[in-house]
Amino acid sequence: MMKKEPFGKHFIIDANECLGELKDRNHIQEFINSLVSKIGMSKKGETIFEYFEDDVNGYNRERDIVGWSVVQIISLSSIVIHINEISRTIYLDVFTCGDLDELAVTLHLSDYFKPNKIKKQIITRDAKSI
């Protein structure tokens, strides 16, 4: 019997001490556009940007949630990135049911945002196996 491939792959990067540009929406859009191209996918719809500012009571600053949340639907799933300006951290999720070059994603994030520390993990997604 032929072994069934899992449905998809969820590649997660936590990046710390990012020295690159984290505030500029155009820079982030360039990152998304070029990442989509590098992984051989195509964008489906516009990139969704939401900026979380510090609030009057300092709650967002205290919780380190000042920065961008960005979502891009791609031909075979999605890219989500959360950028925290205060701690200079980035959380990138790339989910696809196609092939994915994790090294290309990692190098691309490193080129754009210049983190000093990176933690990576891959989660295999396959609801039919449970």
Image (cartoon, rainbow, N blue to C red):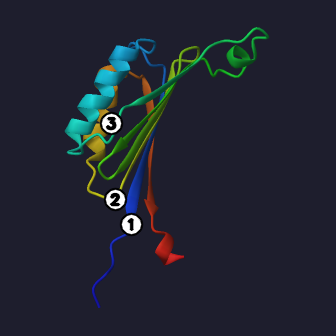
Q: Do the CB atoms of the residues marked 3 and 1 lie less than 8 Å apart?
A: no
The numbered dot on residue 97 is 2
Furthest-right residue in this view: 57
Residue for point 44% across, 15% down: 22
Instruction: Please determine whether, in this image, residue 93 is positioned above or below residue 82.
Output: below
**Circle 2 residues within 10 Å: few <14, some 14–19, many ≥20:** some
In front: label 3 or label 2: 2
Q: Position of residue 123 (x, y in %)?
A: 46, 56
The secondary element bearing badge 1 is classed as loop
Residue at mark 3 to residue at mark 2: CA–CA distance:
18 Å
Residue picked out by circle 3: 106
Which residue is rendered at x = 33% and y = 78% of the image?
A: 4
Give residue 7's mark.
Answer: 1
Q: Are marks 2 and 1 in contact (CB under 8 Å)?
A: yes
| Mark 3 neighbour density, 10 Å: few (under 14) some (14–19) many (20 or more) | some
| Rendering coords of residue 78 (x, y %) | 39, 45
**Could you tell me residue 59's position as x and y percent?**
75, 17
> Are there few (<14), some (14-19), or many (20+) residues within 10 Å of tag 1?
some
